[in-house]
């Protein structure tokens, strides 16, 4: 037990440290400026939060993650404290879905599954840095996914131990509504998984599981509320109001639709690294000892990941960040299979690949965010001390857009204009132009 606890600490502490440092170094960019100025003008209270959510629902982004984002921009250490815990919680929940039980701090094999999932996500997730540290993306996609998967956990655990009780019914109904309000493209896959669970329960003799039915109903209600929000017809310049889902699919064409679907397996190609320990295990005559229930759960996770991708075909906007949920589910399924191969050599090989992936990606994240923090601090000081009505020149960020950072938001004229207006400046100019892909998509 002591050895297992030390192994868990050796895994969690370094990962938490990377997450906390990069969170601390996150600059204010893009939509973050709006949240910053909102807090300066209105502050945060029940009244302002309610007004904020009403405005978002009627004329902007109606997702529940927007409220989390607003809270995380509250002045103070809250973002640095809460965000790494939320992200570690996401990986813990993914491990729960993979294992079919809560991972135990007394088991080293559970720790291996957990760290393998983290390493796989670090190696494969697109827009990894923004999804972990940029609060608007983190609130809309990472926190949204955590709430989605927490809703799914009781269904997974009940499939193993029949743990759902009737008195959970109102809780599952309410939590289903909350989960349905998180994201448009994840809801259908989650609803399908919930319905599949009901079929499984029915076939094994559980005709009615009240709280399971309540959760599915709540999810459906939440999806209807989210998709029917007036703000959906205002966002993206009213694209959702002008064109139907079928129109969006047709406009993409065969090539565009094929890229949307095939992008997921392309993004997951780094998972081939984890075939090395599997090859080692099979060379020594070992085969996967994965229980049948875990195999079914892994197949369901892969089916959900695929359905989420097909849902993107009807989205008015499309970007790397929307694959995060699918990638996380695929990594959980892959980790459960890789870690099921027995043998000390196979486990050590898996751990070696995990460490290599985590060290390389973490080093890049730390380097880029520390450098970006220094550059942002210098730029922010210039803006804060600028005299109203003047033209201010600020340095360009050295980090271009990648899977680790979003790049320089001031390369977008509308962003510079809105920030200049907020600071009552005549204009903001950049000292140096560099070739880059300017960020243009919204959360």
Image (cartoon, helix red, strand yellow):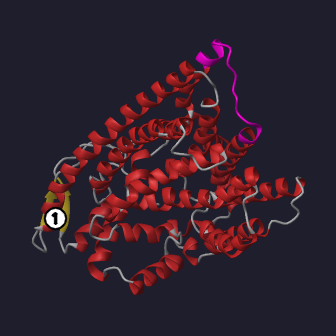
Q: Position of residue 340 (x, y in %)?
A: 64, 30
* Secondary structure found at label 1: helix
Residue 410: quarter of image: bottom left
Coordinates of residue 213 in the picture (x, y in percent):
78, 67
Above or below, 25 against 69 in this view is: above
**Nearer to us in this view, 312 or 349:** 349
350 left or right, relative to 423: right
- Region of the chain picked out in magenta, as a range: 279-294
Kindly tell me whether residue 441 is visible in this rendering. Answer: no
| Disc 1 residue crowd, few under 14, some 14–19, many 20+, Cα 10 Å | some
Instruction: List the residue tagged with mark 1.
Output: 383
x and y, in percent, of residue 391 in the image: 13, 65
Residue 124 appears anywhere in the view: yes
Residue 317 within the segment the image draws in magenta: no
Residue beneath the point at 69% across and 26% down: 288
Above or below 21: residue 150: below
| Nearer to me, 2 or 426 | 2
Q: Is residue 348 above or below residue 86?
A: above
Q: Which residue corresponds to the image point at 41% horizontal and 44% vertical from the top-left?
A: 12
Relative side of 69 to 419, left or right: right
């Amino acid at each position: 037990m002591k050895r297992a606890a030390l192994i868990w600490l050796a895994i969690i502490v370094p990962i938490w440290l990377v997450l906390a440092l990069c969170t601390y170094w996150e600059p204010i960019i893009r939509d973050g400026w709006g949240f910053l100025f909102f807090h300066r003008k209105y502050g945060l209270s029940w009244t302002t939060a309610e007004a904020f959510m009403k405005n978002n629902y009627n004329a902007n982004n109606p997702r529940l993650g927007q409220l989390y984002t607003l809270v995380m921009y509250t002045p103070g250490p809250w973002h640095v404290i809460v965000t790494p815990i939320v992200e570690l919680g996401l990986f813990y929940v993914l491990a729960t879905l993979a294992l079919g039980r809560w991972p135990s701090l007394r088991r080293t094999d559970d720790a291996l599954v957990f760290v393998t999932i983290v390493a796989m996500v670090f190696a494969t997730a697109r827009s990894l840095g923004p999804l972990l540290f940029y609060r608007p993306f983190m609130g809309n996609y990472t926190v949204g996914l955590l709430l989605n998967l927490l809703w799914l956990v009781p269904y997974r655990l009940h499939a193993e131990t029949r743990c759902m009780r009737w008195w959970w019914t109102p809780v599952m109904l309410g939590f289903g509504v909350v989960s349905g309000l998180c994201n448009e493209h994840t809801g259908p896959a989650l609803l399908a998984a919930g319905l599949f669970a009901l079929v499984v329960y029915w076939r094994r003799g559980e005709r009615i599981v009240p709280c399971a039915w309540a959760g599915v109903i709540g999810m459906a209600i939440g999806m209807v509320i989210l998709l029917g929000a007036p703000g959906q017809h205002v966002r993206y310049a009213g694209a959702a109001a002008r064109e139907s889902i079928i129109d969006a699919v047709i406009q993409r064409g065969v090539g565009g639709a094929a890229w949307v679907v095939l992008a997921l397996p392309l993004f997951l190609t780094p998972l081939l690294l984890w075939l090395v320990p599997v090859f080692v295990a099979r060379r020594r005559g070992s085969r996967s000892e994965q229980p049948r229930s875990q195999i079914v759960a892994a197949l369901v996770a892969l089916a959900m990941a695929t359905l989420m991708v097909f849902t993107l075909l009807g989205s008015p906007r499309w970007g790397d960040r929307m694959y995060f949920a699918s990638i996380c589910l695929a990594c959980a399924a892959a980790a459960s299979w890789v870690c099921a191969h027995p043998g000390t050599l196979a486990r050590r090989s898996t751990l070696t690949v995990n460490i290599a992936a985590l060290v390389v990606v973490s080093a890049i994240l730390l380097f880029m965010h520390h450098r970006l923090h220094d550059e942002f601090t210098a730029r922010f000081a210039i803006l804060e001390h600028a005299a109203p009505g003047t033209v201010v020149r600020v340095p360009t960020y050295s980090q271009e857009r990648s899977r680790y950072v979003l790049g320089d938001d001031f390369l977008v004229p509308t962003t510079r204009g809105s920030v200049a207006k907020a600071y009552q400046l005549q204009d903001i100019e950049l000292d140096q132009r560099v070739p880059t892909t300017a960020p243009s998509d919204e959360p």
